[in-house]
Image (cartoon, rainbow, N blue to C red):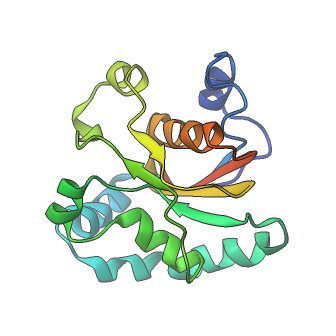
Amino acid sequence: MDCNATCSDCQKWEQSDKWQGVLKRNQSLYHYHEGIQEVITQWKYRGDYVLVKLFQSDIERIVKDRRKQWPTAVVPIPLSSERLVERGFNQAEAIARLMTRKPVHLLERLDSEKQSKKTRYERLNRINPFRSKTSVPPHVLLVDDIYTTGATLRYAAKALQDAGCLHIESFTLIRG
């Protein structure tokens, strides 16, 4: 699900002086629907890690199609340490590992609040929960599982941009 046209959500983000140009584009593999919700629930919340393999061939196709314009670093969105212990794995890293053998961990998550429990307003109006842990390359691909409001990706992109990253794109498995 990669559109050349800018979606209405991204248009809204681009109207904000704070967020304009922070994230160049997002590409999602699937639209959110009831069937994919069941798979994600089993994978992400019940710890059935092996289910990531269901997405492997589609992700490999994306990587092959975009190999020439691939960024310097594939960066999974980090989980808080509490969430990592709770789930046993980082779903964004699992996706990133299907894209590259060596995902780069440039970000640190400062909070442990569940995004799924927040309203859209709360997600969009909070202190940035991410910071860069190290120097950053000029071109980064952020990876996450689900794009709901776009806030997580934009906060992560903003932390990378503030650390000197020039071009930030994102890839999500599902677009809500």
Taking depth in this image into account, of 17 and 11 the one nearest to the observer is: 17
Q: Position of residue 120 (x, y in %)?
A: 37, 24
Count of numbered tags: 0
Look at the picture and state if 162 lies above or below 175: above
Q: Residue at x 55, y 79 (%)?
A: 102
Taking depth in this image into account, of 27 and 103 the one nearest to the observer is: 103
Q: Position of residue 155 (x, y in %)?
A: 50, 36
Look at the picture and state if 171 lies above or below 168: below
Taking depth in this image into account, of 129 and 61 the one nearest to the observer is: 129
Q: Residue at x 64, y 27 (%)?
A: 8
Q: Position of residue 18 (x, y in %)?
A: 62, 20
Asked if residue 38 lies left or right of residue 71, the reply is: left
Asked if residue 64 lies left or right of residue 53, the reply is: right
Which quarter of the rendering shows the N terminus? Answer: bottom right
Residue 164 seen in the figure: yes
Q: Position of residue 167 (x, y in %)?
A: 75, 47
Q: Residue at x 23, y 76 (%)?
A: 48
Q: In the rendered image, which quarter is residue 62 located in?
A: bottom right
Q: In the rendered image, which quarter is residue 86 located in?
A: bottom left
Residue 176 seen in the figure: no
| Residue furthest right as drawn | 68
| Residue furthest front as drawn | 134
Look at the picture and state if 71 lies above or below 14: below
Q: Residue at x 31, y 62 (%)?
A: 40
